[in-house]
Image (cartoon, rainbow, N blue to C red):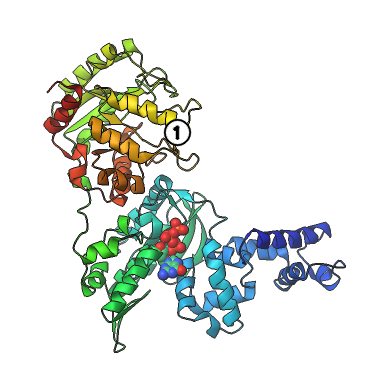
Amino acid sequence: MRGDTAEAALWSRARDLVRERGIESDGDAGPLFADPPAGIDPEILKRLRQIYEAGGWVLVESAVADLPADLRWLFESGAVTIEQLGAIHRALGVTAVADIADAAAEQKLRTIAGVNADVEAAVVAALPALRARIPRIPLGRAVALAETVLEPLRAAGVAWATPVGSLRRGQDMVGDIEILAPTDQPEAAIEAVLALPSASHVLHRGARRLYVLADRVQIGIRLAEPANAGAELLYLTGSRGHFEALQAHAAAKGWTLKADGLHGADGTFTPAAAEADIYAALGLPVIPPEIRNGDDEVAAASRGALPALVARADIRGDLHMHSTWSDGRDSIDQMVEECVALGYDYLAITDHSPHSAAARNLTADGVKKQADEIARARERFPGIAILHGCEVDILPDGRLDFPDKVLEPLDIVLASLHERAGHSPEQLLNRYAAAMKHPLVTLITHPTNRIVPTRKGYDLDYDRVFALAVETGTVLEIDGAPSHLDMDGGLARRAIAAGVTVSIDSDCHRSEMLGRQMELGLVTARRGWVEARHVLNTRPLADVRRVIAAKRGTP
Ligand code: DGT
């Protein structure tokens, strides 16, 4: 297959040959092409010719590096020559995989001069691997980067502006950042983005499209025609599996659903200003983007069985955050003040215990002093309930990292496996079991203990973890810290199906991130089909206290 590492190796060998001849600086590969080394692989010679025809590798490289990333990698895959890529781009205005896939599906590439059905087939074959060599972007960073562009777009008067693709679906790692914003005044929107100091470099500018580098990451902006922006949003949000399931559903109803929207059997086309128009025409409710993963969501929607996903308005408090008493950056007061601004009824300050790997930890003595500080904060902030808690480590032998007499006076205890201690999955499970059976432990934080994107979660038998949680009345967390997002959607869905109560927390270490990390936790929970009724911190404080007391056996 083209577009794989073997292909990269051919290119790299061709480049090496250019460099070995010392002709890199003037970029002229002509002599090398005219007088190739004896016995050269014809595939390498083919690439040398491309280098030569495009006027030298240096030119090719800088031209290619300046393209929107998907075009660049399409060229690098070897599926098209630079001339063919240019012709495709000029004829169709494509800038990303989604456009190229649509154009190929409509057999539009083969109609372009210099491109034929074979090239079209090569492009289609290259698409799935196109992003394989591009580092994916963690959701937290992608959300932050997108926000920098969404705000000026909205201020420039677009009808609405939203990320599309895996970012809108809340996937934990996203391939690219693209934003859709319908407007009748694309120029004004483009100027607003270009005025950003972070928009350092323009990769592509068309009448209704802009690709810029911001903080070294590509952001694509599509300024759609408002009349059909809903259709565009639906296609670009994907996922591919979801769109294909909708296409099958549409076909059964006599429609043809394409990237540009709904086509009737009689050839009529119905533009859609909003996604809801298309779902409605298909007899479906709008399916939330977070569950458009091509699983069973279209089937569920067609039998009226979509979940009422938990939303920000359901959240009454945040049960996991850190202060300067451990590795948080801000004081208790600063954290509380922000929670008040977020409209919460309650929060828990849950700093780390002595054996945590955090930069700073609570001591037993510190817990007492912290209690005094929390008492003072309660006086200063009477409108919000401040729970004094702790995120206590589960030690290698399954005991907790504070004696019971330190934990007993606390309002809530969260337990966490921060340190694997070289243990097997079975041993880790035993540690969880011991902690969950402890009456003082209300909640297990970030259960898989993964680090996005560098560390996979523990390979545990999670069905047993869920059974233990149900049996012991222990809550499992969906942690919204961008490096955790743990449990992820798939696991959260299994947890609630097993009857587990979850909490959605920020695990925040900086007051200004409290809101965003709660949002990331919510998106992750929604990906798991979680409803408000499954979530502890959608409940009034009295109910939360009842859950804690029930576990402690002190109702
Ligand atoms: P990513 O960016 O790699 O995390 O994944 P997505 O889902 O954001 O995919 P992307 O950016 O390549 O394209 C955005 C959406 O466009 C995708 O979710 C569905 C649609 N799309 C892209 N390629 C295809 C395709 O080959 N067929 C179909 N039906 N839809 C596609």
Q: Which residue is mark 1?
A: 425
As drawn, 72 above or below 316: below
Q: Is residue 194 visible?
A: no
**Is 60 on the left or on the right of 346, as rendered?**
right
Residue 228, x across and y down, in percent: 31, 74
In depth, the one of 260 and 544 nearer the eye is: 544
Among all residues in the image, which is located at the extreme top?
365
Give the residue displayed 22% in from the left and 68% down from the top.
284
Q: Quadrant of the C terminus?
A: top left
Left or right of 19 on screen, residue 180: left
Which of the image's four quarters has the N terminus?
Answer: bottom right
**Residue 103: % across, % down:** 47, 76
Identify the amino acid type marked 1.
Answer: Pro
Answer yes or no: is residue 197 visible: yes
Where in the image, quadrant-wise, is ligand 1 located? bottom left
x then y, percent, for residue 220 = 44, 61
Q: Quadrant of residue 267?
A: bottom left
From the viewer's perspective, is 390 left or right of 38? left
Residue pictured at 38% horizontal, 23% vertical: 394
| Residue drawn at (72%, 58%) of the image | 12
